[in-house]
Amino acid sequence: MEPAFEELVAASQARGWTAQETAATLLKIAKAHADRLEAIVDTDGFWRRAGSNSLDAAAEIFREAMRQTVKRYSLWYLVEGVLLVTAGILAVIFPMISSVAVVVLLGWLLIISGALQGISLVGAGHVPHFWLQLISVILAVMIGLLFLRHPGNGLLTITLLLIVFFMIEGISKVVFALTIRPFPNWGWVLGSGLIGILLSLMVWIRIPLTAMWLIGLLLGIELISVGAATAYLAWRIRKS
């Protein structure tokens, strides 16, 4: 440890140092402290850089592993994408059939999930809120049976829910866009919200006719977009 200032002055007087020699010694000590502090700061920066580099390396390893996995099964992903696009095109061409298929599938899912939940409630009368869970099971099975027995009513119900969803989402986007109006590209958010509101109004005006094809059309568009993205990704990785 370096001597204190008073000790250094006393030692310089005892040794007969001049003022210049004492000042030079003080400067050397100060420089040594500065170098040590700089080394500490640089070490801290080194560990920060090392941590950042390690995270980047881990992310790169993960990306490479995913790329290799997709490349290994790229043919299957490509086939899957083509099948999804084909199914989407058929759903768009025959929207009424695909809409009814969606309602029937949803009905079976409600019945199966309600039955499984009901089985789990057997002998569980002591469970808190047992009656609420039992009511949920009964409603799920009843709605599923109604969807299977009257798929047209199921189409109308789901379409009404979609109208409410599009309207609420559109209004929320418009409000959000007006809130962030000074920021760049706020107009895109506003346009998206207005399109959602307009879409909900168009579907509402044409109901119940829109209920016959809306769900199938939306399903077809979703299948085409997902299938095209999957096939394109598999094709690009397969060619790389």
Image (spheres, rainbow, N blue to C red):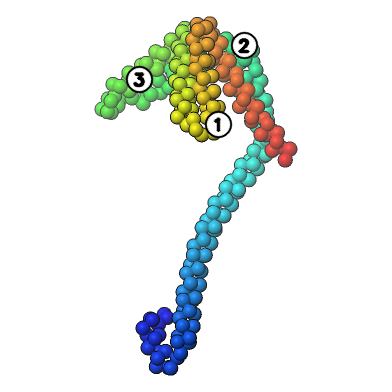
Outermost residue toward the right in this view = 239
Q: Nearer the viewer, residue 7 or 110?
A: 7
Residue to which mark 2 is pinned: 94
Q: Amino acid at mark 2?
A: Phe
Which residue does the image show at 40% across and 17% down from the upper left? 140
Residue to which mark 3 is pinned: 136
Residue to which mark 1 is pinned: 185
C-alpha gap between disc 1 and disc 3: 44 Å
x then y, percent, for residue 100: 54, 11
Q: Nearer the viewer, residue 67 or 213?
A: 213
Looking at the rendering, in which quadrant would you find the C terminus? top right
Q: Give the crowd class for mark 3: few <14, some 14-19, many >=20 residues within 10 Å.
A: some
Q: Is 207 placed above or below 164 here?
A: above
Q: Nearer the viewer, residue 187 or 226?
A: 187
Q: Nearer the viewer, residue 56 or 236?
A: 56
1 vs 2, front mark:
1
Query: Label 2 near label 1: C-beta < 8 Å?
Result: no
Q: Amino acid at mark 3?
A: Ser
Q: Secondary structure at mark 3?
A: helix
Q: Amino acid at mark 1?
A: Asn
From where the camera sits, is residue 76 visible?
A: no
